[in-house]
Image (cartoon, helix red, strand yellow):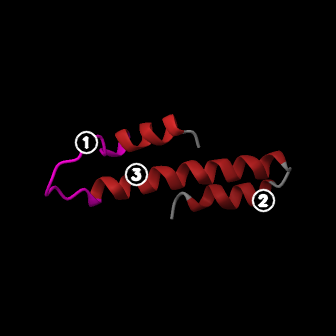
Amino acid sequence: MKQDEIIEMAREAGLTKFVQNYDQSWAIEQFYKLVAAKEREACAKVCEDLELPFVADAIHARKNK
């Protein structure tokens, strides 16, 4: 992942500014989910490129868990 992609995901998750004494655990969890989804897609793409569709399908199925 490139830095601009990570920054965009942080913004999407609501981590755009620091507010003292503000619980950001929800935004951090959303950021984690966005990063994990992006990584799963990258792994699935590699598997598809290696002609391992059953592995790619298994990775895609993980997004629902």
Label 3 element class:
helix
Front of the two marks 3 and 2? 3
The type of residue carrying mark 1 is Lys
Residue closer to the observer: 62 or 36: 36
Q: Which mark is residue 60?
A: none
Residue 3 x %, y %: 52, 39
Say whether disc 2 or disc 1 marks the residue closer to the N-terminus: 1
**Does residue 62 lie above or below 53 as drawn?**
below
- Horizontally, residue 9 falls left or right of residue 15, namely right
Residue 15 x %, y %: 31, 46
Q: Main secondary structure of the magenta part?
A: loop
Residue 39 x %, y %: 59, 52
Q: Is residue 46 magenta?
A: no
Label 1 element class:
loop
Near mark 3 (Cα within 10 A), the count class, few <14, some 14-19 or many ≥20, is many
Q: Residue at x 35, y 39 (%)?
A: 11
Residue highlighted by disc 3: 31
User: In 3D space, how far apart are the residues under numbered discs 2 and 1 (Cα atoms)?
Assistant: 41 Å
Q: Residue at x 78, y 48 (%)?
A: 48
Residue 12 x %, y %: 37, 40
The type of residue carrying mark 3 is Phe
Q: Which mark is residue 54?
A: 2
| Extent of the magenta region | 12-25
The type of residue carrying mark 2 is Phe
User: In 3D space, how far apart are the residues under numbered discs 3 and 1 (Cα atoms)?
Assistant: 14 Å
- Horizontally, residue 20 falls left or right of residue 58, namely left
Q: Quadrant of residue 24?
A: bottom left
Q: Residue at x 63, y 48 (%)?
A: 41
